[in-house]
C-alpha cells in the first residue's frame, strides 16, 4: 500500500487509517460529525496527496486535452481551472478531473487516486498528437484547506492575496516558506477555502505551519469520511459511487461540462443521448422517515416497483436529515416525486430533492 508524505504525522495524531485507492489514508481523527461541522463553521485541513497529477505540455497540449475531455478547454486562460470528464468511446466516464492552465503550452490534469494508472494509460494510448505528457503524481503532495475561516487564517503564510483567488482560479507562488506552490480555489466541500500543491519533501513543514496558522481559528485535521459527507451535502459526484464507466455525463447531470462545439471521445453517443433523452438520471433525495440510505439500496416507486438504485447516502451532519443520490428511470426523476428506499426489509419514504442539500 502506498503512503503519503504525511502518513506518520497522521498516525501520531491518532488518526484512524484505512486502505483507500491503494493508499493508507486517514479516514477520521476526532470523529466524522465533529470534523464535518468544524469545516462548515471554522476550517479544516485534509491530506489528499493520493490524488494524481499529470503535466501535459508542448505545442499540441491543448489538442490532446480537447480530444480526450468533455469540456471546452480552449476557453481556459492562464491561471484558470476547469472541471471536466475523460470519456470512453461509448461516452462512459473514465474519470472526472480538473484541468489547470499555466500557459498555452502547459496544463496540469488532477485525477482521482483510484484511476491514476487507468487514466494515464488512456491518455498515453490516445496521444496521437505527440504532446509531452508526464505523470508527476508520486512527486507532489496536496492539502485541501477548507472552511469559512480558511483565507483569514492562511493569509499570514503567503504574500498572494488569497481573497483575490476566485472560484476555479489559481496562483503560483510562495506559501509557508515554500516556492512554486500552486494555490487553487476548486473546493469539494461547499464551504470555501483552497488547495495547495507542493513537492513531497516540503509536506511536513507546510503541514506544521498550516496547523500553527490556523490554531486561533479552530483548525482541525479532517479525514476522508467527513470529506465524503461534506461533498454529498453539496450533491457533488464521487467517482466509483455516482459516476463510473457505465454512466455518462448526460445521465449524471454533467451536461454543463459536455460541450459539442468540438470533437472528443464518445461525443456522438452523448450528443444522441442528449437529443433523445437518457433512460435514467442521477437524482438527489431526502428521507422523510427514519433510516440511512446506503450505496446499492433499491429505489422504488409508491407502487413498490424498483425504479433505480442508491449510489451515495448518509446522515447529513449539517441538516440532521438522511440524504442520498441515485439513478432512477427518467420518468420518475422529477423534483418533488415521492419515492421509497428499500433499507433491508423496510421501504422508507423519501422525496426527490434537487441538491445542494446544505445551503449556507
Image (cartoon, grey):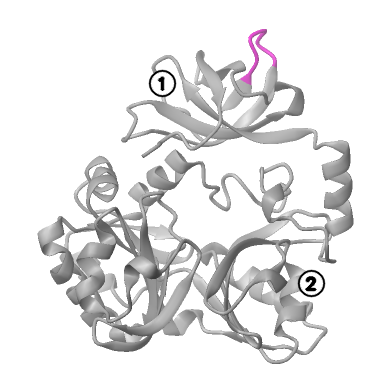
Task: Describe the element under mark 1 as helix, strand or loop.
Answer: loop
Residue 127: image tag: none
Q: Nearer the viewer, residue 301 or 360?
A: 360
Would you call the spot at circle 1 few (<14 residues within 10 Å), some (14-19), or many (20 or more)? some
Q: How many marks?
A: 2
Residue 72 image-quadrant placement: bottom right
Which of discs 2 and 1 lies nearer the camera? The answer is 2
Q: Are marks 2 and 1 in contact (CB under 8 Å)?
A: no
Question: Where does the image place residue 68, in percent across and percent down from the top left?
Answer: 75, 69
Quick check: can you spot residue 122?
Answer: no
Residue furthest toward the top? Answer: 303
Q: Is residue 157 above or below residue 249?
A: below
344 left or right of 90? left
How far from the left and from the top, in percent, is residue 22?
47, 66
For marks 2 and 1, the one nearer the N-term is 2
Q: Is residue 331 above or below residue 248?
A: above
Quadrant hosting residue 187:
bottom left
Q: Main secondary structure of the magenta part?
A: loop
Front residue of 112/355: it is 355
Looking at the image, residue 286 lies above or below residue 121: above
Highlighted magenta segment, given as a residue range: 300-305
The residue at the point 19 percent across, 49 percent down is 30
- Image coords of residue 90 (percent x, y): 83, 55
Identify the image quadrant of the C terminus: top left
Q: Give the residue drawn at x 46%, y 73%.
A: 170
Q: Which mark is residue 291?
A: 1
The residue where tag 2 is placed is 67
Quote the CA–CA distance across marks 2 and 1.
44 Å
Amino acid at each position: 500500500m502506498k503512503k503519503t508524505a504525511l502518513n506518520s504525522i497522521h498516525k501520531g495524531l491518532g488518526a484512524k487509517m484505512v486502505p483507500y485507492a491503494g493508499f493508507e489514508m486517514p479516514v477520521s481523527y476526532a470523529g466524522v460529525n465533529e470534523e464535518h461541522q468544524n469545516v462548515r463553521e471554522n476550517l479544516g485541513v485534509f491530506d489528499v496527496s493520493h490524488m494524481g497529477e499529470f503535466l501535459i505540455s508542448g505545442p499540441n497540449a491543448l489538442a490532446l486535452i480537447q480530444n480526450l475531455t468533455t469540456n471546452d478547454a480552449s476557453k481556459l486562460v492562464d491561471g484558470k481551472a476547469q472541471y471536466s470528464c475523460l470519456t470512453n468511446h461509448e461516452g462512459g466516464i473514465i474519470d472526472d478531473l480538473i484541468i489547470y492552465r499555466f500557459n498555452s503550452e502547459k496544463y496540469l490534469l488532477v485525477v482521482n487516486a483510484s484511476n491514476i494508472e487507468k487514466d494515464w494509460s488512456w491518455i498515453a494510448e490516445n496521444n496521437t498528437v505527440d504532446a509531452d505528457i508526464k505523470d508527476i503524481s508520486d512527486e507532489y503532495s496536496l492539502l485541501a484547506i477548507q472552511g469559512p475561516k480558511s483565507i483569514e487564517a492562511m493569509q499570514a503564510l503567503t504574500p498572494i492575496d488569497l481573497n483575490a483567488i476566485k472560484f476555479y482560479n489559481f496562483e503560483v507562488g510562495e506559501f509557508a516558506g515554500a516556492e512554486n506552490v500552486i494555490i487553487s480555489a476548486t473546493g469539494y466541500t461547499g464551504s470555501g477555502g483552497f488547495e495547495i500543491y507542493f513537492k513531497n519533501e516540503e509536506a511536513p513543514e507546510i503541514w506544521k505551519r498550516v496547523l500553527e496558522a490556523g490554531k486561533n481559528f479552530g483548525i482541525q485535521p479532517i479525514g476522508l469520511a467527513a470529506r465524503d459527507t461534506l461533498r454529498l451535502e453539496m450533491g457533488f459526484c464521487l467517482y466509483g459511487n455516482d459516476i463510473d464507466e457505465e454512466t455518462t455525463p448526460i445521465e449524471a447531470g454533467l451536461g454543463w461540462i459536455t460541450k459539442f462545439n468540438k470533437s472528443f471521445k464518445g461525443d456522438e453517443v452523448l450528443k444522441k443521448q442528449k437529443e433523445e433523452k437518457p433512460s435514467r438520471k442521477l437524482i438527489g433525495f431526502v428521507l422523510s422517515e427514519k433510516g440511512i440510505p446506503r450505496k446499492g439500496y433499491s429505489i422504488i416507486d409508491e407502487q413498490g416497483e424498483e425504479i433505480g438504485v442508491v449510489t451515495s447516502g448518509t446522515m447529513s451532519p449539517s441538516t440532521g436529515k438522511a440524504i442520498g443520490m441515485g439513478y432512477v428511470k427518467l420518468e420518475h426523476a422529477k423534483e418533488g416525486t415521492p419515492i421509497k428506499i428499500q433499507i433491508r426489509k423496510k421501504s422508507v419514504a423519501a422525496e426527490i430533492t434537487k441538491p445542494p442539500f446544505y445551503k449556507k
